[in-house]
Amino acid sequence: MESGRLVAVFGAYGHTGRFVVAELAARGFLPVLSGRNARALGELADGHGLEARVASVDDPASLDRALAGAVAVINCAGPFASTTGPVIEAALRARIPYLDVAAELEANLDTFAHFRERARDAGAVIVPAMAFFGGLGDLLATAAMGDWTSADEAHIAYALSNWHPTAGTRLSGAVSRERRGDFRLRYRGGQWEQRTDAAPTAEWTFPEPVGRRSVIAEFTMADVVTVPQHLAIPDVTTYMSAEAARDVAAPDTPAPTAADASGRSDQTFLVDVVVRSGGAERRATATGQDIYAITAPLVVEALDRVLTGRSKAVGVTPAGETFDAPDFLRALAPRIAFDLHPQEQTA
């Protein structure tokens, strides 16, 4: 294996991290496993014949050792409010690209706010939220925009057959709620708003076979951070199917369980994106299986494009700005089925 294919994975032993490690190996990269739990790292490394490097976000020297010789780092360790800053700093010191799979609003907002200028001035590539939440919706919205240079609003609706949260999802959610306090966030008129009322319910007509479903509107996810970073859309809203929202909020919902040899659960998803301008709208949809597992091909495809010069931006940039969105989505087939309706329809 060439040393030029060595990729550090921080948080490699987590639920999503394991999918990322497997995807890297399948695509010819050499994952170097990193994180603070020496026992979990050792077990994963022994099972795959890989190198483990113990590192902690409160020990910069350990992060430097973890990234030594790597061509890039993928951060899979939540809560990302604690890990993004230190791992990005280590990537900047190592002069290598950084990608993460953060879904936390506050962590992603922090990344853009704190590192945009530094990364641009250093010629560094930092791609946050390169995951199911944040990355996929942004790519779909960018593809749906087509030749439009602006739009009035973007709507990203998620229909999940269920949402059995991982321990990492629960912990990250708790950290986000602690940071927000009694507020929830939405994006209107090009600005973030803090709201104290309950998120509204609504009905959304998804493409078949899902059809019309009850959704929680203003169920604000990382896409609401990534999309406005590069698309001139002043109102961005995300929606979650009501059943999935109840699942993830309930304290007794079990963690995901494997339904096939790859470790994927039987959860299915449909992401429906509508952008509107004046009286016209454009739409893009994606369907697939397991929101955690699908993050692996998303972030590894992004990594491969960065390393092979197929990224268009430098600095802290979201997926839709960094990559050719339609081409990126096509590369994910057949694991994601993608449908774009470039012809404008009456809204």
Image (spheres, rainbow, N blue to C red):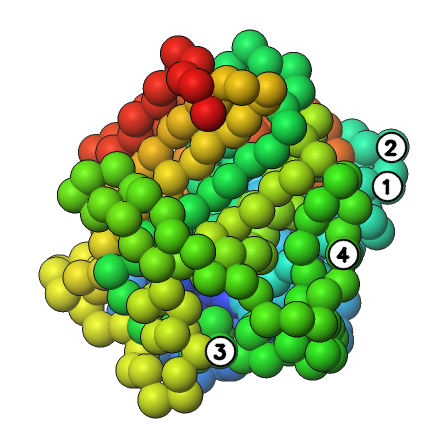
Alpha-carbon span between mark 3 and mark 1 = 31 Å
Disc on res. 170 = 3
* Helix, strand or loop under label 2: helix
Q: Residues within 10 Å of mark 4 (few under 14, many from 20)?
A: few
- Point out residue 291 in the picture as x, y percentages from the top left corner: 35, 55
- Point out residue 163 in the picture as x, y percentages from the top left corner: 33, 68
> Disc 3, disc 4: CB below 8 Å?
no
Indicate the amino acid at tag 2: Asp
> Disc 2, disc 1: CB below 8 Å?
yes
Alpha-carbon span between mark 1 and mark 4 = 27 Å
User: Can you tell which of label 3 and label 4 is closer to the viewer?
Assistant: 4
Indicate the amino acid at tag 3: Arg
Specify the quadrant that holds the N terminus.
Answer: top left
Establish if 181 lies above or below 115.
below
- Point out residue 342 in the picture as x, y percentages from the top left corner: 40, 15
Residue assigned mark 1: 118
The answer to whether residue 297 shows anywhere in this view is: no
Could you tell me which residue is drawn at 27 percent across and 48 percent down?
Answer: 212
Residue assigned mark 4: 193
Establish if 169 lies above or below 194.
below
Residue assigned mark 2: 121
Lower sequence index among marks 3 and 4: 3
Could you tell me which residue is drawn at 29 percent across and 82 percent down?
Answer: 254
Could you tell me which residue is drawn at 79 percent across and 46 percent down?
Answer: 191
Lower sequence index among marks 3 and 1: 1
* Helix, strand or loop under label 3: helix
